[in-house]
Image (spheres, rainbow, N blue to C red):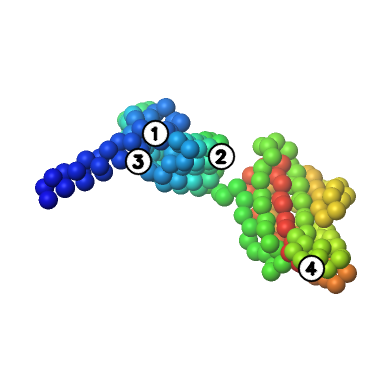
């Protein structure tokens, strides 16, 4: 029985050793030991990496991606959201300020590509009506003052019935901030329309109304959203039939 127990411990230890060896982490300061989920030889999923620094959380293709806490060897830490190995989204950074007798500075808020962008959420979707299947908001760049709106019709079952539908932006109700010009870029594809709001004053909040028309279908749907950070933004809206 004692020999069996010893063999079991050795097998578990060997499995953990193999897991730590064959699953790599792409951040140099985290290379050393890794315990957790792995895919194609790289940390992927949830795990802990220990090198000169330590990270526990989500990984994707060897990089912190998702939610996790990173602790530097000097005790500084960041706890929050990550993307491609950089701070991205909501998070908290704690670090010692050497200019003030190593007092601890806590920075809470939102991050983009590793840089702090403020304590306000960059964007949000406040509400949508039932036929709005998906709303995706992304920032193209940090310059400019434009919002590009793309609306697409999801034709689940519509093609089989032999008719087509089309959704278009029919009104913009400003709730906070203003824009100078609305541009209709026309139909770029059979089921996609593109619009632009130029000269936007941020922060900006509005309700967009979309009309969907088809042989057998007609309805109006809305989304209410807000964008707090200046830039060129793209809003992609999917309307379901």
Q: Does residue 100 lie above or below 234 as drawn?
A: above
How far, Cα to Cα, is label 1 from label 4? 54 Å
Tell me where residue 202 appears, x and y as whole percent: 68, 47
- The answer to which image quadrant residue 230 occupies is top right
Residue 218 or residue 140, whichever sits in front: 218
Q: Are marks 2 and 1 in contact (CB under 8 Å)?
A: no
How far, Cα to Cα, is label 2 from label 4? 35 Å
Q: Nearer the viewer's eye, disc 2 or disc 1?
A: 1
Q: Which mark is residue 112?
A: 2
Residue 40 or residue 90, whichever sits in front: 40
Q: Please identify the quadrant where the C terminus is shown.
A: bottom right
Residue that label 1 marks: 22
- The answer to which image quadrant residue 130 occupies is bottom right
**Earlier along the polypeptide chain: callout 1 or callout 4?**
1
Residue 77 or residue 49, whichever sits in front: 49
Q: Which mark is residue 35?
A: 3
Tell me where residue 164 appears, x and y as whole percent: 85, 63
Q: Does residue 49 lie above or below 168 as drawn?
A: above
Q: Which mark is residue 220?
A: 4
């Amino acid at each position: 029985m004692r020999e069996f127990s010893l063999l079991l411990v050795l097998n578990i230890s060997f499995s953990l050793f193999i897991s730590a060896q064959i699953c790599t982490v792409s951040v140099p300061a985290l290379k050393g030991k890794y315990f957790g989920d792995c895919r194609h030889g790289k940390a992927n999923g949830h795990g802990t990496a220990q090198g000169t620094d330590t990270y526990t959380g989500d990984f994707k293709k060897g990089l912190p991606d998702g939610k996790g806490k990173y602790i530097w060897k000097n005790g500084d830490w960041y706890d929050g959201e990550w993307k491609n190995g950089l701070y991205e989204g909501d998070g908290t950074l704690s670090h010692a300020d050497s200019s003030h007798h190593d007092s601890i500075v806590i920075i809470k808020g939102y991050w983009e590509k590793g840089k702090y962008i403020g304590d306000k959420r960059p964007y949000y979707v406040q509400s949508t009506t039932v036929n709005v299947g998906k709303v995706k908001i992304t920032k193209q760049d940090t310059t400019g003052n434009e919002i590009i709106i793309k609306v697409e019709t999801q034709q689940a079952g519509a093609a089989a019935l032999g008719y087509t539908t089309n959704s278009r932006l029919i009104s913009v109700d400003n709730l906070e901030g203003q824009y100078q010009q609305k541009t209709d870029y026309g139909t770029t594809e059979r089921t996609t329309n593109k619009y632009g709001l130029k000269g936007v004053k941020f922060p900006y909040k509005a309700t967009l109304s979309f009309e969907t028309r088809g042989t057998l279908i007609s309805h109006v749907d809305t989304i209410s959203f807000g964008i707090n950070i200046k830039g060129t933004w793209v809003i992609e809206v999917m309307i379901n039939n």
